[in-house]
Image (cartoon, rainbow, N blue to C red):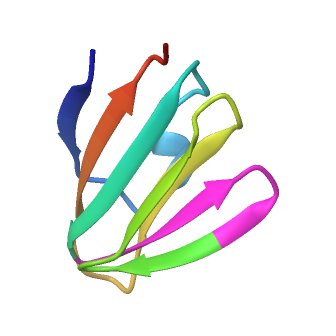
Amino acid sequence: SMSPFLVRPTANASEDPHPEHTGQEFIFVHVGAVELTYGDRAISLVAGDSAYFDASVGHRLRAVGGEPAEVVVITNPGP
């Protein structure tokens, strides 16, 4: 089953542990700007952007731009 929740990442990604897990993950940036680190890639996202990915790959979020950010996260453990 899908599990939705709201994340308010800080500017320091190490303060917001988000370990890899089985299944898929969808994120939607509701407010602000964030950097999604996915594996060895850094992806910039702003309000209105989204990403969908294999959650078994290491990933984390951090707020960028000096303003608070809110991200809607929906996880699905898979089939």
Q: How many marks?
A: 0
Q: 57 or 52, which is in the foreground? A: 52
Indicate the quadrant where residue 76 lies: top left
Image coordinates for residue 79, horizontal then vertical, percent: 49, 13
Image coordinates for residue 17, horizontal then vertical, percent: 50, 33
Q: Residue at x 26, y 24 (%)?
A: 2
In this orientation, does residue 41 appear?
yes
Looking at the figure, which quarter contains the N terminus? top left
User: Which residue is situated farthest in the front direction here?
Assistant: 79
Q: Which residues are magenta?
A: 32-42
Image coordinates for residue 29, horizontal then vertical, percent: 27, 67
User: Which residue is situated farthest in the bottom direction here?
Assistant: 65
Is residue 13 within the magenta segment?
Answer: no
Please tell me whether residue 19 is drawn above or below residue 12 in the rendered image.
above
Q: Tell whether 79 sits left or right of 26.
A: right
Q: Tell whether 43 sits left or right of 61.
A: right
Please tell me whether residue 23 is drawn above or below residue 8 in the rendered image.
above
Image coordinates for residue 65, horizontal then vertical, percent: 38, 86
Q: Residue at x 45, y 17 (%)?
A: 77
Q: 43 or 52, which is in the foreground? A: 52
Q: Tell whether 6 sits left or right of 34.
A: left
Q: 34 or 2, which is in the foreground? A: 2
Please tell me whether residue 68 is drawn above or below residue 67 in the rendered image.
above
Indicate the quadrant where residue 73 lies: top left
In this orientation, does residue 69 appear?
no
User: Which residue is situated farthest in the right direction here?
Assistant: 40
Task: Look at the magenta stretch and give its main secondary structure.
Answer: strand
Q: Tell whether 13 sits left or right of 31.
A: right
Indicate the quadrant where residue 58 lies: top right
Q: Residue at x 54, y 62 (%)?
A: 36
